[in-house]
Amino acid sequence: MKRWSYAGLFLAASLGPVLGLLGGSDASASEAADVNVTFYGAADNDPGGSTQISNPSVHDKAGGTGTFDDPITFAAGEGSYQPGTKIYYPALKKYFVMEDSCADCGANHVDLYMGSANDDGIVQCEQASTKPGEQSIVVDPDPDLPVDSTPLYDGSCHAGGSTGETSAKSPAAAKSLTVGVPTTSNGEASNNTQFEKP
């Protein structure tokens, strides 16, 4: 009897990968996608200055460190991603989770949460870090991808943009950006506004 049990286990282990190729099991669901990537923070959240999110799944408020177990909040247009969907942004080496809505985001757009600061520096960092065109992300990523634990913004911009600091490597980085928090017609801070670099 034990011989058959071991033989059955061996057969199942041998055929598992083959059945996976035929659609018989759940292979990795990771999927690469090219999307527009922008950034937002408490300074330009709705309501302005808050860390409120519309679809809490991992966090009660916007946040995260960027690891698989503690992904950073991201916002997306209605119906684009299910709440709780994780993505990985290779350019920043960070995981994000869909927990907020973005009224200005289309189906091919993610708005990544940069932090809870309410100063002009975070808005400048958001603007400077937003790259033109589509960027590559991974949807439903594996849990063991490389992670950079540096905050995106902690008074200094660590998201690939410059907020006006002088750099010998990049003359463009020396150009100061002056950006105020955008407002709606009733004077409240606007949520998830896209900025263009001057």
Image: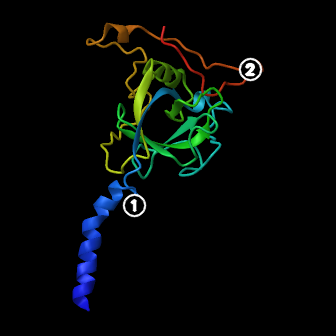
Give the distance between the C-alpha atoms of the residues marked 1 and 2, in whole angstroms.
56 Å
- Residue 91 at x, y = what percent? 35, 31
Q: Which residue is mark 2?
A: 187
Number of labels in the image equals 2
Q: Residue at x 37, y 33 (%)?
A: 92
- Residue 72 at x, y = what percent? 47, 42
Secondary structure at badge 2 equals: loop
Q: Is residue 108 above or below residue 164?
A: below
Secondary structure at badge 1 equals: loop
Based on the displayed image, in which of its 4 quarters is residue 155 positioned?
Answer: top left
Closer-to-camera residue (113/88): 88
| Residue 51 visible in the snapshot | no
Q: Residue furthest front?
A: 22
- Residue 170 at x, y = what percent? 30, 11
- Residue 10 at x, y = what percent? 23, 74
| Residue 150 visible in the snapshot | yes
Q: Amino acid at mark 1?
A: Gly
Q: Which residue is mark 1?
A: 24
Would you call the spot at circle 2 few (<14 residues within 10 Å), some (14-19), or many (20 or more)?
A: few
Q: Residue at x 21, y 87 (%)?
A: 3
> Between disc 1 and disc 2, whose residue precedes?
1
Q: Residue at x 31, y 64 (%)?
A: 16
In this image, 107 relative to 127: left or right?
right
Would you call the spot at circle 1 few (<14 residues within 10 Å), some (14-19), or many (20 or more)?
A: few
In this image, 162 relative to 84: left or right?
left
The numbered disc on residue 8 is none
Q: Amino acid at mark 2?
A: Gly
